[in-house]
Amino acid sequence: MTNSPTGPSTSSHASHSPESHADTGNPTGPGPALRVLAGGRLLLAAAALAAPRRFAAVVGVASSPELTYMTRIYGARALAMGLGYLTASTPERLRWQRLGLMVDIADTGTGLVHLARRDVPARAAIAMVALTGSYAVAAAADVMARRGQVARSDLRPRKHAA
């Protein structure tokens, strides 16, 4: 039996979960690359919230009041995702990572559809697909690497306390 912040546990696997070792340097926890990506979300949020017209110009889209509004919505979402990841406990950080991955996959898929339709400027679609796609690839690679490490750790003999 082990004690945890949520109470006693009789599970022999409680100390071997990826969540329990992520902040102690165990390779099954979120790596520094994901913290860098979360920091990048905060930078994108700052740009989108503080200077939405400039953000649109950098991406290659003509500014309009509607686009300014939508860019600020995007900025607020990026801010919430970045702060959520960076300020969460380790188990919750893993959840934020997966939520971010889901959003990035959806955004990348949407961008690819618009790129194929050619109904938005190519420069804008390529820039945003590259951005969201790179976030999706990095997060997916981390999830897959962690799954492999967890599977390998399950093969190691466990030491049980007497």
Image (cartoon, rainbow, N blue to C red):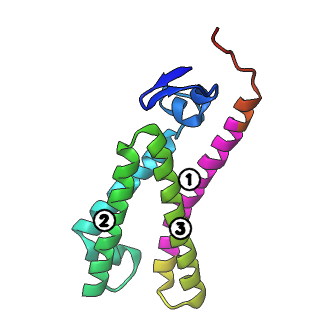
Mark 3 touches mark 2? (CB < 8 Å): no
Residue range of the region highlighted in magenta in the rendering: 126-150
Determine the main secondary structure of the stretch shown in magenta.
helix
Cα–Cα span, label 3 and label 1: 14 Å
Q: Which residue is mark 3?
A: 130
Q: Which residue is mark 2?
A: 76
| In magenta stretch: residue 22 | no
Residue 45 placement, left or right of 27: left
Cα–Cα span, label 3 and label 2: 20 Å
Dot 2 alpha-carbon crowd within 10 angstroms: few under 14, some 14 to 19, many 20 or more:
some
Residue 152: percent from left, percent from top: 74, 33
Residue 57: percent from left, percent from top: 33, 78
Identify the residue at horizontal 61%, vertical 48% (top origin). Answer: 143
Residue 70's mark? none
Type of amino acid at the residue the image marks with label 1: Ala
| In magenta stretch: residue 145 | yes
Instruction: Judge by depth and name the residue closer to the eye, 94 or 123.
Output: 94
Sooner in the amino-acid sequence: mark 3 or mark 1? 3
Mark 2 touches mark 1? (CB < 8 Å): no
Q: Nearer the viewer, mark 3 or mark 1?
A: 1
Cα–Cα span, label 2 and label 1: 20 Å
Q: Which residue is mark 1?
A: 139
Identify the residue at horizontal 38%, vertical 83% (top origin). Answer: 61
Sooner in the amino-acid sequence: mark 3 or mark 2? 2
